[in-house]
């Protein structure tokens, strides 16, 4: 029986939705069944998605209830495969990671069902090739992620509500955009749509694309709508946050890629008005992205809660993706896609590490931890390399993507976006070091003396993702190959990759030879280590309290807090305090209060006693008579 | 207000012997039970600053003498209020209600001379660490013997052959 | 990677720290002379490094503590290889300015990790100050880099140096950018008024509080290389990389190399003079300073370049 | 209380040093001694009234930086400890702690007459009379606060001793570690 026939996207979706159902009922009986089944289904789905590489399939299914001309299409192409492999692999690894983390937590059985459902709907969003199925899966994804956030109990309800309100607002604006497109063009299938786009009037395109883009900007937490992101990412259960911020935040970017480049197409986009050779629609998104990156970094620097810090960091990194996406040249789109991949890799590891540490220390306040580096070496090393990638240190893949985005921005001479993004990147180095210093370095509190690495189920995903980060730094040709094919599918001139081993963008503008940088770094590290080991006498380990305290002995002043972690960046906070008071949340609160007052006013119209209604009727009739008289 | 006016006003205090030591300094001896009143009297006269509480060991008269060193900013005058208490059970009332700073001075007097001050909450060890002998500032404390017994008894490091 | 390249790399990797130590020695001499005293011999830094490496006992807190100085020296050595020095191009065609800016972060990160692992509150505060200072001078410095890149329409430092050979030196073409870059250089060198991270009186030499013996020797080498790297970055950007004579003949190359050394020392000398007489800012004052006047000047320089380059 | 088991100072301190001492002196080559001599870094820790004498030493008149001497803040970075005046029990505890945090080879110079025999405080109940009983001292400088000239002469002598390998205070501390510790215990009934 030819199994390859089953390797089609619709079977992947069916497998996952059925899997969610089966896992729910199996989970009722034994937890082992729940774990093994959820791992099995997600693993199988991951395998099938991996085998879909290079296949351009399109299959249609016309359910009887839909009106004429509308049917649901599901298919794969290089762009969708690129996002699908990220989503599928992250879901599988997050499920494996969450088994020990979510053990014994509240409504654990629902967690696995909803995660499989979410995985299915995310892949559905990516595989769908028409507006209707795209929107259906989009809503399924929002709903299942909302339910997953509420699993964390009382604390997360407010955050989940924020997330839900903003997502539905985005969904409605997307729905209006989609219906405008369907009504105008009569079809929902992407390829047919993009065929009819070239001649359409420009302001219609601006309106429909704008409305759809609002939905995607909400999901990728861009500037005006980032309010839901930090609370939702941090209050969600520890098992779900890696998937939520690592994978889910990329779908907003995928949606923009889809609508801007696949459906509307580059030429029509430029036709909608261009600014220095870049579509002004794209430039607006790039501007939004870079400002989000900057502001989210400032918020992240001030956070003492480990998950909120990483949440704001996610918002700022997605800002980079939006920036690359908006500029629209082959370099920047490649950079944006590559950064989406990198962000998925390192942010998931960081959140997994954070989950493991929270489970170990029982608190989310970073200032109450410390000195875990020697106790939890694997967690420390994986998180260290991921933070290198986050801060774009050249020996990790994170640098490649940011370098591409900067190259494109400077090439186009954008003097506002490039420095803002650069300073945000230095800021990202600041807050990521705050995480390292507060959690892993400094003094080990007595309570954490017996800390040790989490179980294998947590460390395997972290090691896997980190090794991919390092692998892609050495061999950037592999991811860039997939990105080049995705770019050519999107109708953008693909980035030319010189060889599998290193990408040397040889254009006259700038060069980055990953292989040379890596070999020099490793060689110099080797030489320095040897030189250091033999120079001078060998060094002797000393207890953590045997530090220079100007002559005092720590044991007899143990009330001395030697761990410098609370209020780590107080000077910067004191600088930005006056400006941070006007936070965006206050505008939303004001908007909410105004809305309440408005509805209060309307409610008072129905005062309940009949005379006022009679007056209303008479008044109305009088107005009519006057109007009628005035017209003649 | 010259020194003479001060001397006369102080002399008016019952049971006080006043002597002008030199320009700007007056000594006023008062019986023990009237010490607190004298202090209030002087404070009202303008001596608002308690510079220090000195303590003298008159071992021959078997008495301790407490000298309250007061200073007045307005008139730049200094007065030594002297009080004599018996040496057997050295006890005196605290002046913290007039000058809160007295607590530290009394604490030092307690540690160095062994004088207890009723009403002072904090008569704990102040400068010396785990001191077992008699208060060191007393005249009958033989510091030469103490040094010989504690420090000189310690051998030099490379003495043995 | 021909043999001469490898020899050149190893040669420079040995020569630059020695040159840096020589500069630091001369710096102590000049500061002493400013304070009207004789001051140590110019080779004092070599003696100090020799003594530090000959210490009989070294203490270490954990393997992260050991990695710190190694990371710092490695990061700075790698950065040095990507910067054209006098006639030597080394690897500067394989990585452009953005790569260099990020490579410099590695050494900062190395010291921060090592200092953090020492568990001393002084080092934590010192590292915080170093990072805040870095973020403060990055904004004007990036704006200046952007103005130079746009003016010469390339991000590769080697291109900028070669273009400056025929076009005018950037210090003449973009004088405002050069001034702001020099202010940022003061912060990069860590000279007063911007040496908060290693303030001896306030945070007991910050990150270096627990480092002694051979670790401190490595950190001294790091500081020496850092002086040369940051100085030559400025020289390449604004002073034409020291290329005055035609580099084809051997004599020309040697003279260029000397001119380059002279220029780097000139930049270090300017920073030194300011250091000898200036007190130290508080760290938030330094941050406010860098994000106010240098940034405004940098924006003006950027607008000037946009206008000039759009003709 | 610092018990024997949890030694602040390294384990090999207590071991019999004879054999190790010869090796150290011979293997501590002339170049290393010259380098140590020419770049003595002193702990910036003024224990007594002699601290004020260091100011003229560092400024333009006597300028000890000519010899490469430089005040360093932490004991970890320095190798010269100056005891500049009378030492009472509380200061001795901090001095010993700082001395033990300094890496080898380390040298101690005692200023004035108080560390020698207690000086004017010879009969005080808190002052240590002979510093050498608790801490190996390499050089004493006589004078109830020695003038800067004599301090510069002392540093000169210290450098010669280092060059000839006679400044072996840190080795004596290792060799007679238990005796030194015993004396220190006698003074502080309770370490802290």
Image (cartoon, coloured by chain):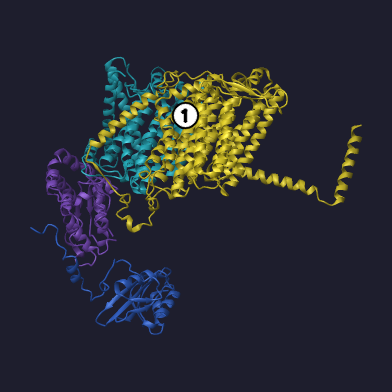
In the rendered image, which residue does mark 1 sit on? A402
Q: Can residue A526 be seen in this view?
A: yes
Dot 1 lies on which element? Answer: helix
Label 1: chain letter: A
In the rendered picture of this protein, how many numbered marks are placed on residues?
1
Q: In this view, does C291 lie to the left or right of C121?
A: right
- Residue A437 located left or right of residue D9: right
Most extreme residue toward the front is A1
Q: Where residue A26 sits: x, y (%)? A: 55, 41
Which of the 4 image quadrants contains residue A10? top right
Q: Residue C128 occupies which quadrant of the picture?
A: top left
Task: Give the blue chain's letter.
Answer: B
Residue A477 is situated, as x and y percent measured from the top left of the image, at 43, 22
Chain in yellow on the image: A
From the viewer's side, name the closer residue of A217 and B154: A217
Judging from the image, what is the letter of the chain drawn in purple? Answer: D
The spot of residue D90 in percent (x, y) is: 27, 61
Q: Which of A73 and A415 is in front in this view?
A: A73
A110 relative to C95 in the view: left or right: right
Q: Residues within 10 Å of mark 1 (few under 14, many from 20)?
A: many
- Name above or below for residue B92 compared with residue D86: below
Between residues A190 and C259, which one lies in front from this camera angle? A190
Estimate the x, y position of residue C289 in percent, counting from the top left. 46, 40
Report whether residue A298 is seen.
Answer: no
Query: In this structure image, what is the colour of chain C?
Result: cyan
């Amino acid at each position: 029986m030819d199994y390859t026939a089953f390797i089609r996207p619709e079977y992947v979706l069916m497998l996952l939705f059925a899997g969610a159902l089966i896992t729910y009922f199996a989970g009722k009986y034994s937890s082992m069944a729940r774990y093994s089944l959820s791992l099995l289904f997600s693993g199988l789905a991951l395998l099938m998605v991996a085998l879909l590489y290079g296949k351009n399939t399109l299959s249609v299914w016309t359910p009887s209830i839909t009106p004429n001309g509308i049917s649901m299409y599901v298919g794969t192409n290089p762009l969708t495969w690129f996002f699908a492999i990220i989503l599928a692999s992250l879901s599988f690894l997050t499920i494996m990671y969450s088994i020990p983390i979510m053990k014994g937590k509240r409504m654990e059985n629902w967690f696995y069902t909803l995660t499989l459902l979410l995985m299915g709907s995310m892949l559905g969003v990516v595989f769908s090739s028409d507006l209707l199925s795209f929107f259906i899966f989009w809503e399924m994804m929002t709903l299942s992620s909302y339910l997953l956030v509420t699993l964390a109990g009382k604390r997360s309800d407010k955050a989940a509500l924020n997330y839900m309100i903003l997502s539905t607002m985005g969904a409605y604006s997307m729905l209006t955009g989609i219906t405008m497109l369907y009504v105008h063009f009569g079809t929902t299938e992407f390829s047919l749509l993009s065929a009819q786009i070239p001649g359409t009037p420009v302001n219609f395109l601006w309106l429909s694309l704008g409305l759809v883009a609002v939905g995607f900007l909400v999901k990728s937490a861009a500037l005006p709508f980032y309010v839901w992101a930090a609370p939702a990412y941090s209050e969600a259960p520890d098992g779900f946050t890696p998937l939520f911020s690592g994978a889910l935040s990329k779908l907003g970017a995928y949606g923009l890629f889809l609508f801007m480049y696949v459906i509307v197409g580059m030429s029509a986009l430029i036709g909608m008005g261009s600014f220095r050779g870049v579509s002004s629609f794209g430039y607006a998104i790039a501007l939004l992205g870079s400002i989000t990156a900057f502001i989210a970094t400032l918020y992240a620097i001030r956070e003492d809660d480990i998950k909120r810090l990483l949440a704001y960091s996610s918002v700022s990194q997605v800002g980079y993706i939006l920036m690359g996406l908006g500029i629209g040249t082959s370099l920047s789109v490649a950079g944006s896609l590559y950064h989406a991949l990198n962000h998925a890799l390192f942010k998931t590891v960081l959140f997994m590490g954070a989950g493991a540490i929270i489970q170990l220390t029982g608190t989310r306040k970073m200032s109450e931890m410390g000195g875990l580096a020697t106790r939890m070496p694997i967690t420390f090393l994986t998180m260290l390399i991921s933070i290198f990638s986050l801060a774009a240190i050249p020996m990790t893949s994170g640098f490649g993507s940011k370098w591409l985005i900067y190259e494109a921005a400077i090439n186009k001479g954008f003097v506002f976006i490039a420095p803002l993004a650069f300073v945000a990147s230095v800021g990202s180095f600041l807050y990521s070091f705050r995480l390292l210093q507060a959690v892993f370095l400094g003094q080990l509190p007595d309570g954490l003396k017996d800390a040790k690495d989490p179980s294998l189920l947590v460390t395997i995903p972290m090691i896997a993702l980190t090794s991919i980060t390092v692998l892609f730094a050495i061999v950037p040709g592999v991811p860039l190959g997939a990105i080049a094919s995705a770019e050519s599918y999107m109708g953008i001139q693909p980035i030319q990759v010189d060889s599998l081993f290193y990408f040397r963008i040889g254009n006259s503008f700038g060069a980055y030879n990953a292989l040379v940088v890596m070999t020099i770094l490793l060689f110099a590290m080797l030489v320095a280590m040897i030189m250091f080991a033999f120079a001078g006498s060998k060094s002797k380990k000393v207890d953590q309290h045997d530090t220079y305290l100007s002559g005092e002995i720590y044991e007899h002043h143990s009330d001395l807090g030697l761990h410098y972690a609370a209020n780590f960046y107080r000077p910067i906070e004191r600088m930005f305090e006056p400006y941070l008071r006007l936070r965006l949340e206050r505008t939303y609160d004001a908007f909410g209060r105004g809305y309440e007052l408005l509805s209060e006013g309307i409610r008072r119209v129905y005062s309940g006693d009949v005379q006022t209604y009679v007056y209303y009727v008479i008044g109305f009739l009088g107005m009519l008579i006057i109007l009628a008289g005035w017209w003649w | 207000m010259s020194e003479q006016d001060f001397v006369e006003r102080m002399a008016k205090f019952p049971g006080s012997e006043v002597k002008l030591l030199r320009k700007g300094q007056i000594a006023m001896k008062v019986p023990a039970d009237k010490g607190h009143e004298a202090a209030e009297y002087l404070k009202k006269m303008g001596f608002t600053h308690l510079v220090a509480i000195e303590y003298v060991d008159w071992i021959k008269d078997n008495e301790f003498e407490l000298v309250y060193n007061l200073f007045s900013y307005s008139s730049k005058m200094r007065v030594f209020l002297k009080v004599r208490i018996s040496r057997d059970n050295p006890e005196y009332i605290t002046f913290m209600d007039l000058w809160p700073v007295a607590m530290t001075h009394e604490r030092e007097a307690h540690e160095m001379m062994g004088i207890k001050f009723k009403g002072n909450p904090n008569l704990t060890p102040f400068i010396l660490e785990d001191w077992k002998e008699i208060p060191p500032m007393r005249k009958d404390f033989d510091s030469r013997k103490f040094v010989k017994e504690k420090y000189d008894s310690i051998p030099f490091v490379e003495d043995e052959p | 990677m021909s043999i001469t390249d490898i020899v050149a790399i190893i040669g420079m990797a040995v020569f630059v720290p020695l040159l840096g130590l020589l500069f630091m020695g001369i710096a102590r001499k000049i500061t002493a002379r400013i304070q009207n005293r004789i001051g140590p011999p110019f080779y004092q830094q070599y003696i100090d490094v020799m003594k530090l490496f000959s210490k009989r006992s070294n203490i270490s807190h954990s393997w992260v503590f050991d990695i710190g100085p190694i990371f710092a020296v490695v990061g700075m050595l790698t950065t040095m290889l990507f910067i054209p020095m006098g006639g030597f191009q080394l690897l500067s065609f394989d990585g452009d300015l953005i790569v260099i800016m990020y490579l410099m972060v590695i050494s900062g990160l190395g010291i921060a990790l090592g200092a953090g692992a020492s568990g001393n509150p002084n080092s934590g505060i010192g590292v915080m100050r170093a990072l805040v200072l870095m973020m403060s001078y990055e904004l004007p410095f990036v704006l200046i880099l952007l103005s130079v890149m746009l003016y010469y329409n390339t991000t590769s430092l080697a291109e900028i140096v070669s273009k400056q050979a025929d076009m005018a030196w950037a210090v003449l073409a973009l004088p405002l950018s050069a001034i702001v870059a020099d202010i940022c250089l003061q912060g990069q060198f860590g000279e007063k008024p911007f040496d908060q991270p290693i303030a001896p009186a306030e945070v007991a030499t910050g990150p270096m509080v627990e480092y002694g013996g051979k670790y401190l020797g490595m950190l001294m080498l790091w500081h020496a290389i850092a002086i040369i790297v940051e100085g030559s970055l400025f020289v390449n950007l604004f002073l034409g990389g020291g290329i005055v004579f035609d580099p084809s003949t051997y004599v020309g190359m040697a003279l260029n190399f000397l001119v380059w050394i002279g220029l780097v020392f000139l930049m270090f000398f300017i920073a030194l003079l300011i250091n000898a007489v200036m007190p130290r800012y508080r760290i938030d004052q330094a941050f406010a300073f860098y994000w106010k006047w240098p940034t405004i000047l940098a924006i003006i320089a950027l607008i000037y370049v946009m206008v000039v380059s759009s003709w | 209380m610092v018990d024997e088991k949890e030694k602040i100072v390294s384990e090999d301190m207590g071991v019999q040093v004879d054999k190790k001492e010869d090796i150290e002196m011979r293997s501590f080559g002339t170049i290393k001694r010259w380098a140590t001599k020419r770049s003595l870094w002193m702990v910036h820790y003024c224990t007594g009234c002699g601290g004020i004498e260091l100011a003229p030493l560092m400024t333009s008149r006597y300028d000890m930086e000519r010899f490469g001497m430089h005040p360093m803040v932490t004991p970890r970075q320095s190798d010269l400890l100056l005891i500049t005046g009378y030492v009472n029990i509380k200061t001795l505890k901090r001095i010993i702690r700082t001395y033990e945090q300094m890496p080898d080879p380390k040298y101690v110079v005692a200023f004035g007459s108080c560390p020698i025999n207690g000086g004017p405080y010879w009969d005080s109940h808190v002052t240590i009379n002979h510093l050498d009983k608790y801490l190996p001292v390499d050089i004493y400088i006589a004078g109830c606060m020695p003038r800067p000239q004599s301090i510069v002469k002392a540093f000169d002598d210290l450098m010669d001793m280092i060059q000839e390998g006679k400044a072996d205070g840190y080795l004596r501390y290792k060799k007679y570690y238990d005796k030194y510790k015993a004396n220190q215990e006698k003074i502080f009934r309770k370490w802290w």
